[in-house]
Image (cartoon, rainbow, N blue to C red):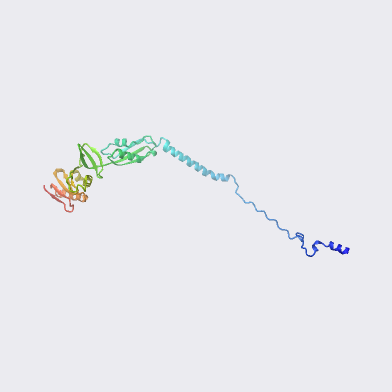
Amino acid sequence: MAGATTAHRGTPSSDRPGRSPRKGAGPAGPPKSPKSAKAPKKTAPRGPGKRLRRGPVLASLAAAVLLASGGTWVLYGSSWLRVERVTATGTEVLTPEQVLSAAAVPVGAPLVSVDTDEIESRVRGRLPRIDSVDAVRAWPHRIGLKVTERKPVLLIKKDANFVEVDASGVRFDTVPKAPAGVPVLELNAAGSPSARRFDEDRLLHEAVLVAGSLPAPIAKETVQVKVGSYDSIVLELTGGRSVRWGSGEQSDAKGRALTALLKAAPKAAHFDVSVPTAPAAAGS
């Protein structure tokens, strides 16, 4: 009994029935290969190459800043591009000195800073005779003013003076003496049946329309424009001649018809172009 017991105890544990061998006790398998370490990423060396590539960009930016600063100084800070002279052209009745005085251009200011729109507005506001003005910079030192004056086509008698009216109906100046070749308005429509419908301003508009549409040779010979009503306008010409014009409608056609009549009947005293397609001349 004792020997059996001893034999039982000497049996290795791995041979015991019903028991699984312990982990790691079995035969060793093939050796596992070690995990290969990841190769480090290659990075470009941070050497002077990067700085060399940034250098030209920074240099260009610096040059641009210097150029901009220098250009600004030349335009605004230096004495090279400043207003030294102002000229005016296109005057007829006015003098260049009157235009320059009204413009009040700041001599000595940087040419680039001069507000030409403000100058133009100032000239028109101070000199109503000016119809248009163009202020331009003439580099490096001059401002030029080109003006166009209004031209009167009709005069309105006011006491001992005459009010000048242009082709747009603008009353722009009062003068003591009537300019040559500009007719005077005679408005006498108080008793007209159409006086309520066509007030004085409307009749003045019609008279201006007629006077402004006259061919130049006829305008020079027109002494007076008489307005009795909207459709009763009469021109008084030099030499005691008269023209029945009618209304201001078809004024261009009436001007052409009157031109033809004056050539066809140079000794006639009365002309009628109220119907321009059937003009007539009478008297001598």
Of 59 and 35, the residue lying toward us: 35
- Residue 173 on image: x %, y %: 25, 39
- Residue 279 on image: x %, y %: 16, 52
Question: What residue is shown at x 55% (from left), y 44% (from top)?
Answer: 52
**Is 189 situated above or below 38?**
above
Does residue 34 appear to the left or right of 138 in the view shown?
Answer: right
Question: What residue is shown at x 24% (from left), y 38% (from top)?
Answer: 174
- Residue 10 on image: x %, y %: 84, 61
**Is 127 situated above or below 37?**
above
- Residue 43 on image: x %, y %: 61, 49
Of 275 and 79, the residue lying toward us: 275
Point out the residue furthest to the front here. Answer: 1
**Is 260 situated above or below 28?**
above
The answer to whether any part of residue 54 appears in the image is yes
The answer to whether any part of residue 212 appears in the image is no
Where residue 183 sits, quadrant-wise, is top left
Name the quarter where the N terminus is drawn: bottom right
Q: How many marks?
A: 0
**Is 128 situated above or below 31?**
above
Question: What residue is shown at x 57% (from left), y 46% (from top)?
Answer: 50
Point out the residue furthest to the right here. Answer: 2
Point out the residue furthest to the left here. Answer: 284
Where residue 181 sits, quadrant-wise, is top left
Question: What residue is shown at x 13% (from left), y 47% (from top)?
Answer: 270
